[in-house]
Amino acid sequence: MAAILSGLFYSSDVYLSLSSVQSTDKVAVVPQLRQFHASAACCKVQSGRYKISPKRDKALTYEMANPPHFIAHRKSWNSWDTTSLLEGQRAAETSVEDVFIRRFVSGTWHDQLCSEIIIKRQHNLIRIAGIIKQGLAARKMYFLIGYTEELLSNWLQCPVKLELQTVENKEATVFKYI
Amino acid sequence: MSCPNLNSLIVQHLFKNGRFHSVWKSGRPVVTNRHSFSSEAKEIVIPKYIPRGPTDILEALASTVKRDPTGPHYKFHDDPYLIPASSHAKRTYALAQEAGRKAASWIKQEHADLFNQRNAEPFIEAFSPVEKLTETTPMTEDLLKKYIRTSQVANAIHVYGKLDSSEISSATKQSFLEFISFYNEEDQLSEELIEERWFRSGVKGMRDQVKSTWKSNGLAERIFSGLDTITPEAYHALICGMVKHGQAVGAWEHYNQMLADGFQPDLMTYNSILKISGIIREDGEYIITLINDILTSMAHAGIKPDVRSLNAALQSISRMPITRVAREKASRLMSDFKSIGVQPSLGTYTSLLKIFCRDKGPRSNILIDIVRRIEIEMPPIQDVEDVTFFSEAMKNCNYHLDDVQLAKRLHSLLSSSQNQVFIGDSYKESVYYRSFLLLLSRAEGPEAFMEMYRHLVPHIYTPEQNVFENVIKSISSSSAIQYVPELWSDARYFELSERDSVLEALLEALTCGSGPDPTIVVDKNDVDPVLATARAIMSHVNQVIKTAEEKDRTISLRWTGSMLGNLMKVFLQYGDLDSADEVMMKVNQLKNQLSSYFPLATLNIFVEKCIERQNSATALMAIDYAAEMGYENVTTMAQRISEQLKLDEKQQQKLSSILSNAPTPSETS
């Protein structure tokens, strides 16, 4: 913790000294000490929460309807891996890969996904789960399954499996409208 | 540290409840404390170390997994929308997934620069894109060796062409000759394309005759003739390659040349020659002489034949035209090989079946002995022919022996988890299950048959049209009408519901019942399943024809007189007169377009029903149809109608006009 804090201070010091050099020519200015914020803290937390729409017609899935503090109570994690355990490895790589997988899958299955993409890692195996709508013919879905699995496993260099469930349309996964 | 305390607590607890005593009495002390355990401990015998292979644990795990008949094959997604039912869908989905894989590997090849990351440690070569052969690639012998090792035929040939052949070492030249003889100068379908191999080989397997695909005067033969010193190994490579790709005559010529040059053939070459001896010699006696000659020369050379020699020789014998001679020779060979300790494989049994059970030959029970033998011990897979055994044996059970008990024994052999590999490919699998289901439908009662049917269909096997028709007919002939609705829904599921012969068979089966069964439909509002099926079939056919007309497509499905007749019969049986009227309207509308006649008996019953409920309009339709078709008793029918039905003036006129237009019985006959 101490190391991180000192790092922060160090970088802000550098920033201050640079700005002071630019703004003044001959007048020697003692760099200002950084001050603590004195106004009331804004305790707003927004991430993972959805705003109510004016007409109250924004559709939410069950996963979206539950804010993050319900994780492990009403809903579960979207990424399952061991990076956050004691001596867990490749934490940074894993999260970057997860972002990549999510972007790749949602782009490949464009407008087909009706849920979040769940990524589960077990040993060297990556299982990608999701709910898709029955918008494509089954054989086209199989093509995309094969394509996604093969390309991702070549990229991530481990076996990748898709575990999909289908629903008739997107409305089937709507939990509530806000 | 808490263990002894806990133990003593449990002991106390048991004593208090008086249970400890009874446990002790039964001879199995469940809870003991440490002291008593150590005093009674026997000497621990550590079992001997069993050496295990690297895959033993995987094999042990695999042996616990069985084919689950209630779900789709593991290669499909377990989701109702994605589970295939018809055999066409199974094929399409599996191949579509593989096409996706192929597309991905194509992208990997085209954009190789995007696949440079190396995550795994140690790096796995299979994840990196294959290096491309370009103009600037230095052509070396090592590169050729690498391509041979990774079996890239086209690239290897390219590199060989660029190299100066005099500079290549003789060892590399030999391995290159072996390589292109084996692959016949063509790139093989990648090992990773499992599905494509599974479905493709079926087409190939249909041909019993070996077709010559060998490239005559190709690179292999040119390299061979260009060799400075011809070695026996070069002969071996060329002969084996020619036999593998069906060039029997060329192989035989080279074999003789080799003997003339004074070289000694090796085991594989001998096996290849044994395999083609049935092709190069046509007469039975000559084939036997040739096989004997080869086996004797093997004995002289001190080469011990193996199970492949046996299989090759038996394959040649199976080509012999006279059954008696072939049987004798096959028995001799079997006993000879047994005496030198060669155990037969499943491929051997396939050839024996072909020899002993000819289509028009006498009946032979050899399969019973074979099954008894492999029930005791299943031989491991040793020959390419081994995978043909089960389909051949099941065909034999069905067409030759007609023995359902034996078929079941055979099926239980195949069903054990380790033996799944013996099924071969999609074609052999469908031959196997087709024969099995046909035999069951003939030999079993409807209950036992349907139990097995539900086990196999639809996930393990989807019946083809003719098999499905046979199933319906067998159900219908045993009057097990309660299964017909299930078969109808299966027909829809297998995409067979637009085939008119299937619909004919289904409707025929629907009429075999004896009318409504009061035990099935207790509630008044419920519809009898048979009646519901008949209604469903009717609306389905109407729907199919309607959509085809709307979209201007030509389909083979048409209403026929017998289909409508059977429908009418069911509706009359179950007292659904509204639907019967509908059928009559259809008949009246189509009339001459019906490809077969509406049965007269059903028409008579219908007219009777019309009279009963005083429905003159539909009765007139029936008369109209009967008159048009020239049925003989149309006048008597008309008379009954005019006597017993109240007709208004218009209808009277119509009736008389129908009768006046109708041909008299003498004209039609």
Image (tube, helix red, strand yellow):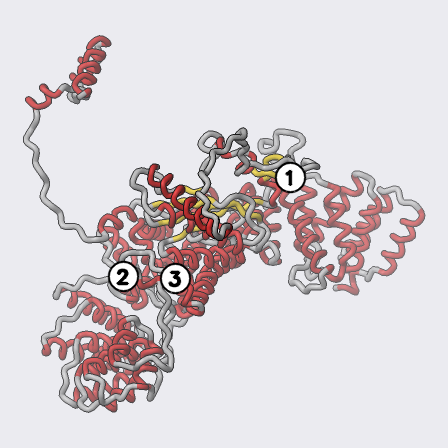
- The chain to which mark 3 is attached is B
Residue B437 appears anywhere in the view: yes
- Residue of label 2: B346
Query: B636 and B463: which one is in front?
Result: B463
Residue A43 appears anywhere in the view: no
> Residue B492: percent from the left, percent from the top?
58, 51
Q: Which residue is the extreme one toward the front? A: A26
CA distance for labels 1 and 3: 46 Å
In this rendering, the label closer to the viewer, 2 or 3: 3
Task: State the mark number for residue B194.
Answer: 3
> Residue B141: percent from the left, percent from the top?
25, 80
In this rendering, the label closer to the viewer, 1 or 3: 1
Query: B79 and B608: which one is in front?
Result: B79
**Callout 1 environment at 10 Å: few (<14), some (14 to 19), or many (20+)?**
some
Please indicate whether residue A57 sits to the left or right of residue B245 in the image.
Answer: right
- The residue shown at (22%, 87%) is B167
CA distance for labels 2 and 3: 23 Å
In this rendering, the label closer to the viewer, 2 or 1: 1
- Residue of label 1: A58
When the figure is inspected, residue B84 is found, relative to residue B200, above or below; the finding is above
User: Is mark 2 in CB contact (under 8 Å) with mark 1?
Assistant: no
Please indicate whether residue B179 sits to the left or right of residue B529 in the image.
Answer: left
Q: Which residue is the extreme one toward the top? A: B16
**Callout 2 environment at 10 Å: few (<14), some (14 to 19), or many (20+)?**
many
